[in-house]
Amino acid sequence: MLILGIETSCDETAAAVVSDADVGARLRANLVFTQLEEHRLYGGVVPEIAARSHLERIDALVAEALREAGVDFADLDAIAATTGPGLIGGVMVGMMTAKAIAAVHGKPFVAVNHLEGHALTARLTHDLPFPYLLLLVSGGHCQLLAVEGVGRYRRYGGTIDDAVGEAFDKTAKLLELGYPGGPAVERRARSGDPRRIALPRPMVGRPGCDFSFSGLKTAVRHALGKLESVTPQDRADLAAAFQAAVADVLADRSARALARFQAETGQSGPLVVAGGVAANATLRARLSDVAQAQGTELIAPPMALCTDNGAMIAWAGLERFRLGAVDGLDFPARPRWPLDSLSAPTASTPAATASELAS
Amino acid sequence: MPNAPFTPSPVLAFDCAGSSCSAAILVGDQVLAQRFEARRRGQAERLLPLLQECLAEAGLSWTDLGRLAVTRGPGSFTGVRVGLATARALALASGLPLFAVDGFRLYAAMTTHSLPEATRRNSALVVAIDARRADLFLQCFDAQGQPLAEPQSLLPEQAAARLPAGPLLLAGDGVEQLLPALTGRDYQVVEGSAAADSVALARLAANLPLPPAGSLPPTPLYLRPPDVSLPGKPRA
């Protein structure tokens, strides 16, 4: 089975071809064009710039992905695209591209929730059986979910204000470390002392699995305001203090979620981390400690599959399609589309055959 | 050369850049299928089904087509992108040549087609396109259909001050917005020109020369940069 996956929901234009072969032979092509430079000047993703950029590149990127995979449109079993959640202008570009290809070649179109792409990546890379606990941490999302099956998610908690990646970006802006904030803060934190400046640990010790990061960002601002003149070492110490606080928060919330997961499923884990923030080595190490302390392990997909990519969309499309899911070419783009609102594909919606779709 | 100009092969044309979603299939002068829906939203949901309905009505499949045509704006940024993303992917997937026509040229062609030469002879044509805000997109053409200036994004009063002297023909889905600024001017609104016409688009595209092999795919005409301001110095 071969699936084309298209992702355009934020600032990465991506196309991939993925198969259901054994782990290791699944990624036939996985191309990502990052718009980083187009947004850097603005210190964040500008939706209209992102949408324009997706349109400029997605068709050529799809052609290149097929070439690299050594396949033709006719060889594909289905076309998958992110249809939300995300920046709607960009989502529409990828979605229409996928629908048009599906229409011309009479192939099934599979609408993929971007978050489900992240959630199922550990199955693409590790063949991980259900259930598992997922910590999804990115620029736009921060949540803990029990993943019980394709389309079956139980939300344990999420952020009540900023996403964690957003907190990194805002902190980097305050510290004038550049964009994107995640790698910038991590780099600067290496030469900093995380204990010199005390920052709060929002939500730590509280019941439940929710997060809050806006207070932490405010605390960074206040700490900066108290300094007479801000030296490079101050910035490094604050970056390190911020990162350590985030690590403590993620560790505390994940430990709680693991306890609940154990109580509900009888399984101690595993804990899967996904999303761009999973690229941070300090956070990964900390989460790995949490998992080990609870008798389980941390599973983190390789970096290129943690940040936005087409392979995860193709894979989520593949998982849905092989359970019978096919979506109409009238499927709407959804700016908001919580994971726990999805439902599992059922046999009552059997995959239409190519000939039915071609008519 | 099956796709050479003037060789009748079916043209599938569509538009969703403005306040409607429309499609048509033409062979020569014959309209095989035509759809028009007034809608300012929902193009991403309706467009592909609309195209499939046209193909079904014409009794054609994608492989029977000779050309694709789409409007490239200006209009709603999202509408323009939905149309062009679809058109570019259809072209990639089918190998068909794609012709993208800007809205000004399309309305000018609609005017030429619908009005007798005698009516057009002494008038300049003003094409006004809805920009979904205070200003509108404007381009003027002489009586021979030659553009008088580059298209612009202007407030109605600014636009009125720049119009050519003499009698005017007005076309486009932004005309209504322009009218209050035209007090005292001698003008005539071109009938049937309040929405892009996919039949006219197909007719235009059928007669355009094929782009040279290896040409880059057509690009949108936004006429306005993204709304964005540079960030100030962060508060600290």
Image (cartoon, coloured by chain):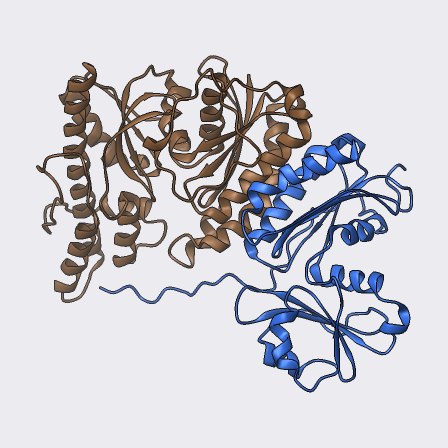
Task: State which chain is coloured brown.
Answer: A
Q: Report the front residue among B160 and B222.
A: B160
Residue B127, horizontal then vertical, whole percent:
71, 68
Report if residue B152 is visible in the image.
no
Report if residue B27 is visible in the image.
yes
Q: Residue furthest bottom?
A: B184
Question: What is the drawing colour of chain B?
Answer: blue
Q: Is residue B134 above or below residue A1?
A: below
Residue A289, horizontal then vertical, whole percent:
17, 26
Q: Locate residue A330: give its quadrant.
A: top right
Residue B225, horizontal then vertical, whole percent:
54, 63
Q: Residue at x 30, y 48 (%)?
A: A166
Q: Is residue A265 above or below residue A54?
A: above
Residue B124, horizontal then vertical, whole percent:
79, 76
Q: Residue at x 36, y 23 (%)?
A: A122
Side of A117 where A51 appears, left or right: right
Q: Residue at x 44, y 47 (%)?
A: A87
